[in-house]
Amino acid sequence: MRIALDAMGGDHGPKPNVAGAVAALTAAPDLSVVLVGDKAPLDPILAAIPHPADRLEVFHASEVVGMNEKPVDALRKKPDNSIARCWQLLATKKVDGLVSAGNTGAVVGAGVFTRKFLKGIRKPGIATVLPTVTGGKCVILDVGANVHPKPGHLLHYGVMGAVFAKHMLGVDKPRIGLMNVGEEEGKGHDLVQTAFDLFRKSPLSDCFIGNVEGRDVHNGRVDVIVTDGFTGNVILKHAEGQFEFMVKLVGQAVIGQLQAEKELGAKLLAKLVDKFHHSSTGGAPLLGVDGCCIICHGSSDDRAIANALGAAAQEARVKLNEKIVEELAAMPAVADDE
Amino acid sequence: MRIALDAMGGDHGPKPNVAGAVAALTAAPDLSVVLVGDKAPLDPILAAIPHPADRLEVFHASEVVGMNEKPVDALRKKPDNSIARCWQLLATKKVDGLVSAGNTGAVVGAGVFTRKFLKGIRKPGIATVLPTVTGGKCVILDVGANVHPKPGHLLHYGVMGAVFAKHMLGVDKPRIGLMNVGEEEGKGHDLVQTAFDLFRKSPLSDCFIGNVEGRDVHNGRVDVIVTDGFTGNVILKHAEGQFEFMVKLVGQAVIGQLQAEKELGAKLLAKLVDKFHHSSTGGAPLLGVDGCCIICHGSSDDRAIANALGAAAQEARVKLNEKIVEELAAMPAVADDE
């Protein structure tokens, strides 16, 4: 398969993107990468790094959306930007997927603009995978594409999250939970109350374990958590912030107070940090798009980019979207205002 | 000052409530506690524990709201329940404040029913205090009293949170942030966009640092975070869940791999857990009530109850509500639909 990589995306410019692409190509012989971006800086970086030239090409795009630019304005003012060009390659079937560590709003916005969605999907959602205490993983979506969802969108997030958990994470029968402020039925605002009823009445009802709470993200009780993009985004960023906070805390108040084994303790803690760092997760897929789109953290290094390209290739291999479309076809029609 | 304690509240029945009350009385000679609950189980517990009888009395209430009962139903079916009786003591000025580890929905619901709110407040909010990497604290509100707030409620939460940070936590000029999905102005849904404008145009604008994100809860960038009760509740419970997850992880993957200093490491980690355990925080104040109301975790032990009683007494000592009313008087009138 062939993946377009936004070579200009992220906080660190093209270098980690190019290095990540080369690493991904080395790991997956069935992968080709199209580096989308400005040839002027890209060509010398490419010339300096050995790479399989038959599987790595540059598609020139003269403009770059800044990480802090307003997405809508930037996409309008810079039609030849690397993010929009990635989407155009996807929309014209020149590639099977795209990966970007660029401005998330612009990646989602340009995708929504192409309207290349899976049948039945009105709003794609960004999924992220967080670790659990049982050694498993919990898929949460949406984490920021859709801050104004309708209950029907949440039902679709449940379908897509469950298919993702099954085929990308190997969970046989994914348990789906609805993020809420309490477990009891009837809790929360209108959105979650209506979504609760939709899940209960849908063919997903067997997998639907009902309302879950913030404490359930990491305790292994649930495989897929469905939520609005506002709450999901706050959870994701809170998880990152609290992880950093606790690592610092443990470093000072525990490891820093050891004597003979201080060095060993620091090494073990660093290993833990490395294991759970976002660069090891393969990015966050934007689910619901006809094609594959993986959004990476702005701070992505080459490992993060390589893992995201690997995840994009794997989505194509397992035919994730075909499976999502099959499951969606079994869902009842949901009115536009639901 | 005199505080009513819901002696029946919490997962562990009256014992930790009585023990916590006695500990609080020992620590604060200016405190009196009214144990509100069923005399039948309370009297023998009290008889078995030495206590200052002149500062500890029992107010009989024959009924108990279960931790998992539907609040509205329970309050209606059980008029002589300990939570409602605490509120009645507050409303009739028999006590200065109340503390409960009981059903949170019932504590808030019974409070809303009494309508003893501060002038200008239409919806009280629950505040919670989380630790930051700089050794400071971050006040977040609302964490669950109001899942359908209007923008004007969020402005009031900013006022109350800032007064709390100043007078209860000793922060000289509290920085207020609005929880959102990005820092840039214009981010997020209608609620936060309108609230952003209200803060900017209010006398609080000097303290208002704008939008903050989930990662800012623990990084020391902000002293007060304002959010809707849905998002706030998810953050609070996620923080607890992730804390437990990481402690377990560090215990296994770091401390468990040490050799000579495994025992020391485990002790240091346990000390850290103890320091940040919710029982050390003094509960979550329901701000906006004319009087003082502190809501404790259902799993509260005697230390948690004692700390909450101490915090309630401290709120009364610093005249927190008088200061909130002064600040509210300086705010512009906000229309009912804002």
Image: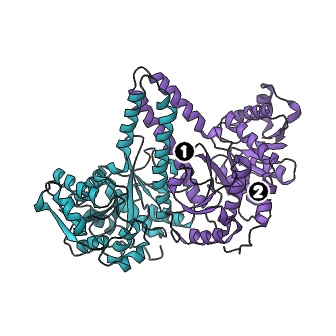
Chain colours: A purple, B cyan
Q: Which numbered marker is on residue B289? A: none
Three-letter amino acid code of the residue under disc 1: Val
Where B132 falls versus A106 (above or below)? Answer: above
Horizontal and vertical percent for residue B142? 42, 62
In this rendering, the count of numbered labels is 2
Crowding at mark 2 (Cα within 10 Å: few <14, some 14-19, many 20+): many
Q: Residue furthest left?
A: B54
Residue closer to the observer: A222 or B129:
A222
Which residue corresponds to mark 2? A289
Which residue corresponds to mark 1? A133
Residue drawn at point x = 46 percent, y = 64 percent: B229
> Which chain letter matches label 1?
A
Q: Is residue B303 left or right of residue B224?
A: left
Question: In the picture, which quadrant includes the N terminus of chain A?
Answer: top right
Where A181 falls versus B207 (above or below)? Answer: below
Residue drawn at point x = 74 percent, y = 72 percent: A332
Q: Is residue B167 left or right of residue B251?
A: left
Horizontal and vertical percent for residue A119? 80, 64
Q: How many angstroms separate mark 2 from mark 1 (CA)? A: 31 Å
Q: Can the viewer see residue B186?
A: no
**Disc 2 + disc 1, Cβ < 8 Å:** no
Residue closer to the observer: B255 or B239:
B255
